[in-house]
Image: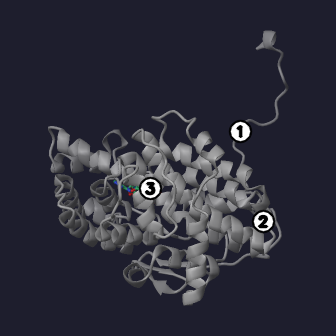
């Protein structure tokens, strides 16, 4: 819990800290987490207040610009993002070239990286207006790309955006509407997805955000940095956990062992099996985001009339874990991913789409952290040291002498 700030030039002293358990990579004003108390704030505002009262694009503005916008500023920002949601026809063709069964996270990172080739005027990382343009383009195009990931998988054409609708409302229309039919999205679904995006919008120096910062520290452009973040997010120990949770719940439902037998496997670390959606590097208490999602899950499922037995299994797993010494001693609680998949599934998304939805939500955080880093005079290229443990010097032997 002690913070030591070091601005020293290299002294020859090297610390080994696998997983950066005790190493801060930067100072940041964006997100505050108290993992022991289960507190999360964006720019000082408690996450529960933002989730209840704000909207995703307002939170994006807050994270990126540091303050809540006044009415006209917010309207102008929302309007600007909406107006950029259309993608170039060639970009659509490009996205159509991936195999239909490709994992959407691989397509998403490739597509985000490719944006830099379509918008070369938005690449200068040191020009404020250019960075703002890249910011707006990323928030807008990622939404369109994400809806297309779903439509490609189900073999339906990409729909054009409708600028008159809200960010989340039109995302749902572009994802689920059938062409030539008027689509009305369910207000409960719009509200729930908006909240889920807010809950995912930033989480300080997690694996994907650290990746974005390290890549950006070489002065790589915003698209290249964020595309790297998408790849980091795809792993099952990070954003990929939401998909992994659903497949775990499915497996339990369709297997001949019950919840208690599964938990025994977890505790005995059989085949490295973990209770996915549990545990967190920073939270040693209930993840405040998970508490909000859990409350929403039941409400959304019942409003949509999609009662899911998997929710009962998840609730039972949590109940066992919260009363079991293995989980208590290690301070393992549900994280944000434990219940999100059940809500996404009820909304009509396939499991492969869960992590892209996380990426859509995390976009403002990646952008805000990249922008903060580029402006920070303390920033240096990310270049960790190592402790070498390989062979000492030895002479090269030609192949016939080995
Ligand atoms: N199920 C069972 N045991 C667990 C779990 C779990 N989900 N998570 C941690 N443990 C155990 C470990 O086996 C270890 O036990 P040990 O002390 O006997 O060796 C101990 O708890 C500490 O675990 P570490 O892996 O050292 O903790 P770390 O901080 O490195 O990992 C992580 C955090 C990756 C999130 C881990 O808890 C995990 O794998 N969880 C499951 C995947 C998951 O839900 N990821 C999403 C994270 S949140 C997010 O990205 C949005």
Position of 275 with respect to 69 (left or right) is left
According to the image, label 3 marks what residue?
174
Q: Residue furthest bottom?
A: 70
Position of residue 28 measured from the top left corner of the image (x, y, whole percent): 64, 77
Is 80 in front, or is 269? 80
Give the quadrant of the C terminus.
top right
Is 145 in front, or is 341? 145
Whether residues under marks 3 and 1 lie with C-beta atoms below 8 angstroms apart, the answer is no
Q: Which residue corresponds to the image point at 47% horizontal and 73% vertical from the top-left? A: 56
Dot 2, crowdedness within 10 Å: few (<14), some or many (≥20)?
many
Q: Which residue corresponds to the image point at 52% horizontal and 86% vertical from the top-left? A: 44
Q: How many marks?
A: 3
Q: Quadrant of ligand 1?
A: bottom left
**In the figure, 339 relative to 391: above or below?**
below
Q: Quadrant of residue 255?
A: top left
According to the image, label 2 marks what residue?
125
Q: Which residue corresponds to the image point at 44% horizontal and 75% vertical from the top-left? A: 35
Whether residues under marks 2 and 3 lie with C-beta atoms below 8 angstroms apart, the answer is no
Position of 358 with respect to 292 (left or right) is right
Q: Quadrant of residue 369?
A: bottom right
**In the figure, 48 relative to 130: above or below?**
below
Of badges 2 and 1, nearer the viewer stands: 2
Position of residue 291 measured from the top left corner of the image (x, y, whole percent): 31, 73
Of badges 3 and 1, nearer the viewer stands: 3
Is 222 in front, or is 214? 222
From this viewpoint, is residue 24 visible?
no
According to the image, label 1 marks what residue?
390
């Amino acid at each position: 819990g002690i913070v030591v700030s070091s601005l020293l030039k290299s002294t020859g002293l090297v610390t080994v800290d696998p997983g950066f358990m005790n190493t801060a990579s930067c100072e940041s004003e964006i997100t505050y987490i108290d993992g022991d108390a289960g507190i999360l704030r964006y720019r000082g505002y408690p996450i529960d207040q933002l989730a209840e009262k704000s909207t995703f694009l307002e939170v994006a503005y807050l994270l990126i610009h540091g303050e809540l916008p006044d009415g006209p500023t917010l309207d102008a920002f929302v309007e600007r993002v909406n107006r950029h949601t259309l993608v170039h026809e060639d970009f659509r063709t490009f996205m159509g070239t991936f195999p239909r069964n490709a994992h959407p996270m691989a397509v998403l990172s490739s597509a985000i990286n490719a944006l830099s080739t379509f918008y070369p005027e938005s690449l200068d990382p040191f020009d404020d207006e250019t960075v703002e343009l890249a910011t707006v383009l990323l928030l807008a195009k990622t939404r369109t790309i994400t809806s297309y990931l779903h439509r490609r998988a189900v073999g339906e054409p990409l729909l054009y955006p409708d600028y008159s609708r809200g960010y989340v409302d039109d995302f749902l229309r572009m994802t689920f509407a059938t062409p030539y039919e008027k689509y009305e999205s369910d207000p409960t679904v719009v509200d729930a997805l908006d909240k889920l995006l807010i809950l995912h919008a930033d989480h300080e120096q997690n694996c994907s955000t650290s990746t974005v910062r390290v890549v950006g520290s070489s002065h790589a452009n915003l698209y290249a940095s964020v595309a790297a973040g998408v790849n980091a997010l795809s792993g099952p120990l990070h954003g990929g956990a939401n998909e992994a949770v659903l497949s775990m719940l499915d497996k339990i439902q369709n297997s001949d062992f019950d919840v208690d037998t599964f938990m025994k496997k977890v505790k005995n670390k059989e085949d490295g099996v973990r209770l996915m959606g549990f545990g967190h590097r920073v939270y040693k208490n209930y993840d405040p985001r998970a508490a909000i999602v859990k409350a929403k899950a039941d409400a959304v499922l019942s409003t949509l009339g999609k009662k899911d037995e998997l929710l009962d299994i998840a609730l039972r797993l949590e109940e066992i874990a919260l009363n079991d010494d293995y989980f208590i001693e290690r301070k393992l609680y549900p994280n944000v991913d434990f219940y999100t998949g059940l809500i996404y599934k009820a909304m009509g998304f396939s499991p492969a789409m869960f992590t892209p939805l996380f990426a859509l939500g995390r976009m403002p955080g990646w952008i805000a952290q990249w922008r903060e880093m580029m402006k920070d005079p303390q920033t240096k290229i990310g270049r960790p040291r190592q402790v070498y443990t390989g062979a000492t010097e030895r002479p090269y032997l030609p192949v016939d002498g080995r």
